[in-house]
Amino acid sequence: MPDVGDLVTARLTVDPADETTTASLTVTRPDGTTVSPVTTGDDDGAVWTAPVSYTLAGLWRLSWTVAGTGASVEHQVVSVGPAPAVTVTGRVYATTTQLAEILHAAPPLNAVQLLTDASDALRDALKTAVYDTDDDGMPTNPKVAEAFAEAVCRIVEWWGETGDAVGADMGWDSVSAGPVALSGRSSSGAATPIAAGTLPPRAAAALQRLDSCVFWTGVVTGARRW
């Protein structure tokens, strides 16, 4: 699958074909705009090529129109992925550098997406946490920011260990952080979702030291909430 920025050579084989065969290409971008690159024929009209530059992520349609011998219309849909992300953006609580330091290993190639998903999971799990933030919703207290970063990295670590982004850790006894609590051991393979106050043990443990920085409440008024 190509990514944004790739320049590829589109290719069409026509059979039957002869010196009367011609082919044109119309490329429809994901935003609906079109472009008609220059086509080049070879092998007495049996092979046609054209350069296509993928500038947007999404679905592209390549429509070949053949005239003369072998007249036909051929369509191909190409899925183009975004350029791989290497830096986090938005309300993501940890960087790939912090993840590498937590894992003591090189981060996975999809680390940015994992950290983004883990940050969403953390917010979903701790909906009653109230703390100071900037205008973008990021914690301003260094201790809170550090704990959030570690918790997010521990969620990613847990996903890697269990192979299940829904969660299936079977090794905790008792861990709590504010209203979040884990207890008991499970010998079954049943998955436990990271939601409704449930976090992996190491992620929850990272939040335990925040009692003096985070106010936990079931009802939030007059303060910024996660």
Image: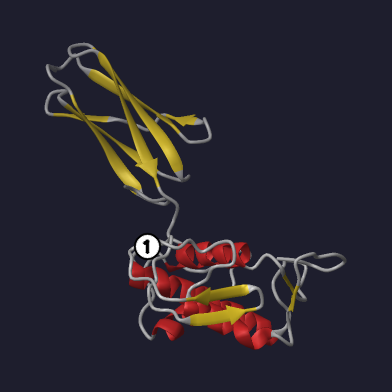
Q: Nearer the viewer, residue 52 or 90?
A: 90
Residue 96 visible, this orientation:
no
What residue sits 45% from the left and 63% below the top?
192
Q: Residue 14, position in %: x, y?
A: 17, 22
- Image side of residue 210 versus residue 175, left or right: right
Q: Nearer the viewer, residue 136 or 216?
A: 216
Quadrant of the rendered image containing residue 17: top left
- Image side of residue 31 versus residue 68, left or right: right
Q: Residue 125, position in %: x, y?
A: 59, 65
Residue farthest toward the right in the current orientation of the protein: 222
Colouring rule applied to residues: secondary structure
Q: Amino acid at mark 1?
A: Asp
- Image side of residue 159 versus residue 199, left or right: left
Q: Nearer the viewer, residue 134 or 66?
A: 134
Seen in the picture, residue 210 relative to 23 is either above or below; the reply is: below
Q: Nearer the viewer, residue 121 or 20?
A: 121
What residue sits 62% from the left and 79% below the top?
177
- Image side of residue 105 versus residue 154, left or right: left
Helix, strand or loop status at disc 1: loop
Residue 27 visible, this orientation:
yes
Which residue, given by chain and number where applicable, does mark 1 sit on? 164
Seen in the picture, residue 224 relative to 54 is either above or below; the reply is: below
Q: What is the count of numbered marks?
A: 1
The quarter of the image holding the C terminus is bottom right
What residue sits 67% from the left and 85% below the top?
210
Quadrant of the rendered image containing residue 143: bottom right
Q: Residue 139, position in %: x, y?
A: 70, 76
Q: Residue 110, position in %: x, y?
A: 40, 64
- Crowding around mark 1 (Cα neighbors within 10 Å: few <14, some 14 to 19, many 20+) is some
